[in-house]
Image (spheres, rainbow, N blue to C red):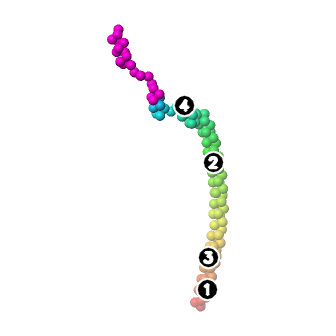
Amino acid sequence: MIDLTIIICLNYYPMITNADINKMKAIFATKDDLKSFATKDQLSSLNEKMNACFIEIIEFIGEVKSDIMKELSEFREEMRDINRASQATLNNHEVRIAHLELNKHR
């Protein structure tokens, strides 16, 4: 029986020390460390807010796109009118130049 007690004493493993706990704190997150992270509910709330903002942005882009398309359409019509007027003036000048050339040779 004494031999068995000596063997058990020789195989004794020490308990966890403060140094071991400090090493584990450096490796693993503590409760205090985890407090700085968002909870599941906070993430869900944030997700809902982001979805609402995203929908607002999409609607705003749609409105801006409509305004831009309207402006471009109006600009295109204005440019067509200017082009028609310029073409008419150019045609008028071509006719006058041709008439002057005919009268010059006479």
The disc at residue 100 is 1
Judged from the image, the secondary structure of the residue bearing numbered disc 2 is helix
The disc at residue 90 is 3
Predominant secondary structure in magenta?
helix
Q: Are marks 3 and 4 in contact (CB under 8 Å)?
A: no
N-terminal-most mark, 4 or 2: 4
N-terminal-most mark, 1 or 2: 2
In the rendered view, does 24 fall on the left or right side of 46?
left
Residue at the spot 65% in from the left edge and 68% down from the top edge: 81
Residue at the spot 64% in from the left edge and 78% down from the top edge: 92
Circle nearer the viewer, 1 or 3 = 3
Which of 61 and 49 lies nearest the eye of the viewer?
A: 49
In the image, what residue type sits under mark 3? Answer: Leu
* Residue 15 located within the stretch drawn in magenta: yes
Measured Cα–Cα span from mark 1 to mark 4: 97 Å
Count how many numbered circles sit on residues in the image: 4
Circle nearer the viewer, 1 or 4 = 4
Measured Cα–Cα span from mark 2 to mark 3: 48 Å
Circle nearer the viewer, 3 or 4 = 4
Judged from the image, the secondary structure of the residue bearing numbered disc 3 is helix
Where's residue 102, x and y in %?
Answer: 59, 86
Judged from the image, the secondary structure of the residue bearing numbered disc 1 is helix
Identify the residue at the far bottom of this view: 106
- Using the rendered image of the protein, determine whether residue 24 is visible from the camera's viewpoint: no
N-terminal-most mark, 1 or 4: 4
Look at the image and give the residue range highlighted in magenta.
1-20
Which of 49 and 68 lies nearest the eye of the viewer?
A: 49
Where's residue 17, x and y in %?
Answer: 45, 26
In the image, what residue type sits under mark 4? Answer: Lys
| Image vertical order of residue 10 relative to residue 35, above or below | above
Please give the residue where the numbered disc 4 appears in the rendered image. 31
Measured Cα–Cα span from mark 1 to mark 3: 15 Å
